[in-house]
Amino acid sequence: MAPRLQLEKAAWRWAETVRPEEVSQEHIETAYRIWLEPCIRGVCRRNCKGNPNCLVGIGEHIWLGEIDENSFHNIDDPNCERRKKNSFVGLTNLGATCYVNTFLQVWFLNLELRQALYLCPSTCSDYVLGDGIQEEKDYEPQTICEHLQYLFALLQNSNRRYIDPSGFVKALGLDTGQQQDAQEFSKLFMSLLEDTLSKQKNPDVRNIVQQQFCGEYAYVTVCNQCGRESKLLSKFYELELNIQGHKQLTDCISEFLKEEKLEGDNRYFCENCQSKQNATRKIRLLSLPCTLNLQLMRFVFDRQTGHKKKLNTYIGFSEILDMEPYVEHKAEPSKSQTRKPKCGKGTHCSRNAYMLVYRLQTQEKPNTAVQVPAFLQELVDRDNSKFEEWCIEMAEMRKQSVDKGKAKHEEVKELYQRLPAGAEPYEFVSLEWLQKWLDESTPTKPIDNHACLCSHDKLHPDKISIMKRISEYAADIFYSRYGGGPRLTVKALCKECVVERCRVLRLKNQLNEDYKTVNNLLKAAVKGNDGFWVGKSSLRSWRQLALEQLDEQDGDAEQSNGKMNGSTLNKDESKEERKEEEELNFNEDILCPHGELCISENERRLVSKEAWSKLQQYFPKAPEFPSYKECCSQCKILEREGEENEALHKMIANEQKTSLPNLFQDKNRPCLSNWPEDTDVLYIVSQFFVEEWRKFVRKPTRCSPVSSVGNSALLCPHGGLMFTFASMTKEDSKLIALIWPSEWQMIQKLFVVDHVIKIMRIEVGDVNPSETQYISEPKLCPECREGLLCQQQRDLREYTQATIYVHKVVDNKKVMKDSAPELNVSSSETEEDKEEAKPDGEKDPDFNQSNGGTKRQKISHQNYIAYQKQVIRRSMRHRKVRGEKALLVSANQTLKELKIQIMHAFSVAPFDQNLSIDGKILSDDCATLGTLGVIPESVILLKADEPIADYAAMDDVMQGKDEFVLGIC
């Protein structure tokens, strides 16, 4: 089979010699590849998408030949879920609950405990004895004992292979996704169960936990001097055995019972000797429970890592454990083994077991017949009935799937042989639909051919690669059984699309020749008024534009019908996409904003009528401007006005610069902390006003003139000043600008001033020298000043995604080394030229640039705070030095989370980080950055201890990850 690209060329090769008006039905069928031969099974191994007659490899192989019935369904045999005869019932693992399931099975196999739990009174038993169990309502146990009763009854008599313990796990409040300490769970649950059963009246129920699991031992201390023996009795429910350094269970028990010498500082005070004496201490087993729980301590504390680690030591143990020597305290010595011990008959070895359970052997015949109470058996019977109904339902579903599969098998065998059209009447059907028809896993939907239609509601020639030509006989059966449409017969072959494609291909072939012709025509001079204006940019790229336009025309034709892959485009979206595309159209680079010829002759040139005629063949919709066409009159007016405005701005800037030379050059400025002797009055304006005015004076043609002094931004809503004299000499000095009286007079002439703010120096008292005081007009507003300070502190504590900087310190010196890509970059632009981007419509709160801005702006406390934030952000910006790393943080994140960020930035583990800010040590990992005083633009010093290279492990430690590996009992 020829490659797809060769098929494409072969289908349209005739277009090189045929004009669009000469296209015939034969040419149309050639374009739709009707002439291609169908493929043969066994010869063609996969479907040829370029060939609409190829019906091989579309999914038919799974239906041809004999088929196993099991392939018609994905439903497992429900009998696989049924409990086998003489087998136990399992428990579903809910995620990380294997330890719970293990203990449930162990407790269930304790017949005495099971019998005692069955004897517990239950709310369900009273309910059943009354009206019976309501079929529509599921039983929900209310207590831990009721949960155990129901689980044990199901484990005993359920027909299911396994049951779900989720109700019991939920009642205990356990997280099914988190592994718990199995030994701790056993202790806590036994304590809970004993406490719950202690309220029962029946002594066989009330004392069952102690009878089955409680033993007794004594701490025995013997004085070496007088031989006096003292005992401290204690009960136990399990023995915790150390396994480190041991290979046999008997060795672990011996160590648990071994004598401990009390000597030196650890001597024992003997009451008989009335002095401290050397002594021995040991544990003496006095009685053993019916069920002996031995906890193997597999998790020990690792001092190096500060975490628990698991011991995977092999421990050998026998099925029968003789505890009589240990009750008599006769330890059996055994040698340690370095390899896995050999396990004979009746013995086992495990490196995962964490608990061993032994039952006391008696001479009496064990009672194996524990009867399930009637009320519980009724619940079990109900659950078994539901299970049987489910099995019948699943079996019926399997049968229905098999029946459908067989019918589909017969249909495919019948129709697939009749799919090829040959010379008989034919139709086109989507390849995707045929594949879904042959897909056994999905139901067959109605035929949908809309995605393959052109703008004329016929079959698009370019979609032929995803269509298949089938016989009219097969098409009739498909549409009668599955419906859908539209049906694409021979009449659906689109002549309009083929003719247009023919025209495009001819233009493509002609493009290179026309490009040379146009270039030669451009060299000739234009005579008279026969020329046309063309954009220089369009002329430079017209061949590329033409080629792209020809390639996209077929796609545009599809979208113009509003149909793409079977979906209808939104009209507004279509217009918006069209508008974006039109920005690149030919000759629109000389259009002015009003749609007329632009006034700049540098952007366009005249071309001859012949050259324009050639270009118009490729760009028939391009704007046309004959040489006699006048430029846009509106643009001419605006150009004149712009020139006049620029001249006016230059004149204003020059006048203001001459009138206020020192203010412009920032020379000879007054200072409050060093009050000048030659004046008793200084005036105040906002520093923002001064910066904006300097920008205009420097670049009057690029900036609008500043027409007013907006001092209202420095006042509160009550008209009071927001600064104290002291703050204006320190932190607030960057927010204001001091003006000499002579300068103030000039400012009042040049600008509209909404409020006069001044500071006056006065002498108070008759004493020589007199006391100097400074007062302001208007006066300070204490309430608003206090509110402003509180808001500023709150803002510094409630930030999100703010930048802070971290310096790594070695030997009390800051590290200066190349760092990773950082947040801030340097710029050669001056600070005055750097303007922060403002959202559309946002105005600066402290001045008005509009003409006639005499109207006072409304000001509020919130407006002033917004202005403060803007100016403070600019004035407090930290200049990052080389080697310093910037981090994005929020006030509510913890120090622990910051340390993880620092770990990735500096490769220093969190526990090796010593952090400080302004001399204050940061050590509380749980504290938030806001409470620790870390504010935006802060610099934190990092001093590292010895580095650790395992950063992946650090992540696990910081995120609280730990590994628990459980064995089986």
Image (cartoon, rainbow, N blue to C red):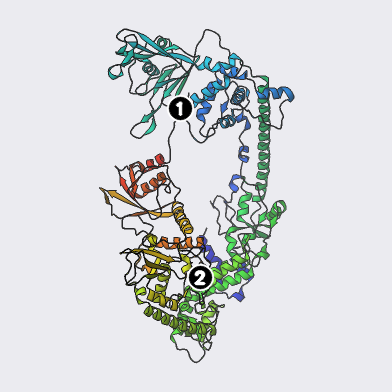
Mark 2 is surrounded, within 10 Å at the Cα level, by few (under 14), some (14 to 19) or many (20 or more) other residues, namely few
Q: Nearer the viewer, residue 115 or 789?
A: 789
Residue 496 at x, y = what percent? Answer: 63, 70
So how many labels did they put on this image? 2
- Amino acid found under the numbered disc labelled 2: Glu
Q: Nearer the viewer, residue 608 or 946?
A: 946
Above or below, 834 against 894 in this view is below
Residue at the spot of label 2: 548
Q: Residue at x 70, y 25 (%)?
A: 127
Q: Which quadrant of the figure has residue 573?
A: bottom right
Residue 532 at x, y = what percent? Answer: 51, 85
Residue at the spot of label 1: 967
Mark 1 is surrounded, within 10 Å at the Cα level, by few (under 14), some (14 to 19) or many (20 or more) other residues, namely some
Above or below, 275 against 736 in this view is above
Residue 464 at x, y = what percent? Answer: 59, 61
Residue 121 at x, y = what percent? Answer: 64, 20
- Amino acid found under the numbered disc labelled 1: Gly
